[in-house]
Amino acid sequence: MDILAVLNLSEIALYFSKMSMFPLFDLAYYIVSILYLKYEPGSVEVSRRNPIASWMCAMLYCFASYIMADILLGESPLHYFNNTSHILLATAVWYLIFYCPLNLFYKCVAFMPVKLILTAMKEVVRVRKISMGVVHAHHAYHHGWIIMALVGWAKGAGVALISNFEQLIRGVWKPETNEFLNMSFPTKASLVGAVIFTLQQARWLPISKHNVVFLFTIFMVVTKVFMTATHSHGSPFAPIEAFICPIIFGNACGIYDDHDRVCSRDNVQSCTPSNLSPYSAKTKEELNEGTRKKKCKKTE
């Protein structure tokens, strides 16, 4: 039995799934995306020094999900730029955030109550993009579950997945910030949502699509608004990961973390195993240096 039907929310979910995202929700998506771009180190300097590079970064923040999905499906990455109205709207937002006199527009959208509303609207667009990505991939690959999940994931977290490329445009290279190595909550949530929508598209979930969209949107909106309001960088998936990962992948990560924590201390002997002599802890350079000295003595 459908839970939403029992609560008389099925009609609301159906209306919500048919609601148009343009222009209000898309406008909120562009504002929050470019707002986070301005938070990035060096982005303001780039906007003053090279506006073209700043504009390209802003377009990636707004449309990277579509570019990633088109690349995965073998289509032109410039396909979405055919939507002139969206490009102009995002460009206007970029100009106002970076070049508005006295930073008035930035101060207005960065005001916390306004920012929370815009963040909630952005998450509505994110969930809709994940759903559309899965459907788009399903039309091309009817039985490609992995492809559907990957395209949906790219639609939901495209800018995070190609963040290193965006950093190159800004003249910054931080490989340690690779999203695959340290996923943020939106990236993890987009992956979970892509899997859920893929299962629903494959008829493995006994629930209608508009209900899945409605329920997952509520989860994303509530979680992201709470994290933004509390300035939290944690993830609600952390307790689940802490429980599942040791069972599936073992305790290797925890062991390495403890070892690194011990080795960071001043006492080097604590990092050396007890069954090894102190000489076995020498580095390769020290051993090579000793060998070189011995050879020099022989030649003398």
Image (cartoon, rainbow, N blue to C red):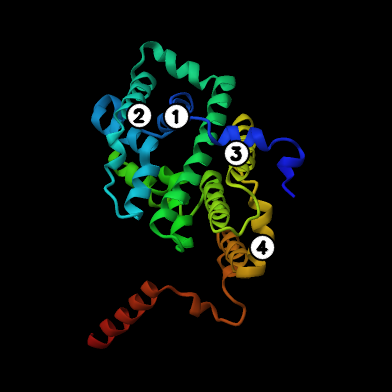
**Secondary structure at numbered mark 2:** helix
- Looking at the image, is mark 3 or mark 4 earlier in the sequence? 3
In the drawing, does residue 253 fall left or right of residue 33? right
Residue beneath label 4, please? 244
Q: Which mark is residue 217?
A: 3
Q: Residues within 10 Å of mark 3 (few under 14, many from 20)?
A: many
Inspect the image, locate mark 3, and give the three-letter code of the amino acid beneath it: Thr
Q: Are marks 3 and 2 in contact (CB under 8 Å)?
A: no
Assess disc 4: are there few (<14), some (14-19) or many (≥20) residues with their C-alpha within 10 Å of its C-alpha. Answer: few
Task: Count every numbered label the image shows and give the total.
Answer: 4
Q: In the image, is 21 to the left or to the right of 7?
A: left
| Along the line of sight, the residue nearer the viewer: 176 or 6 | 6
In the picture, the disc for residue 26 is: 1
Question: How many residues crowd mark 1 within 10 Å: few (<14), some (14–19), many (20+)?
Answer: many
Q: Position of residue 10 (x, y in %)?
A: 67, 38
Circle on res. 125: none
Mark 4 or mark 2: whose residue is earlier in sequence: 2
Q: Nearer the viewer, mark 4 or mark 2?
A: 2
**Mark with earlier residue (4, 1):** 1
44 sits to left or right of 192: left
Could you classify mark 2 by the number of other residues whose Cα lies within 10 Å: few (under 14), some (14-19), or many (20 or more)? some
Residue 86 disc label? 2
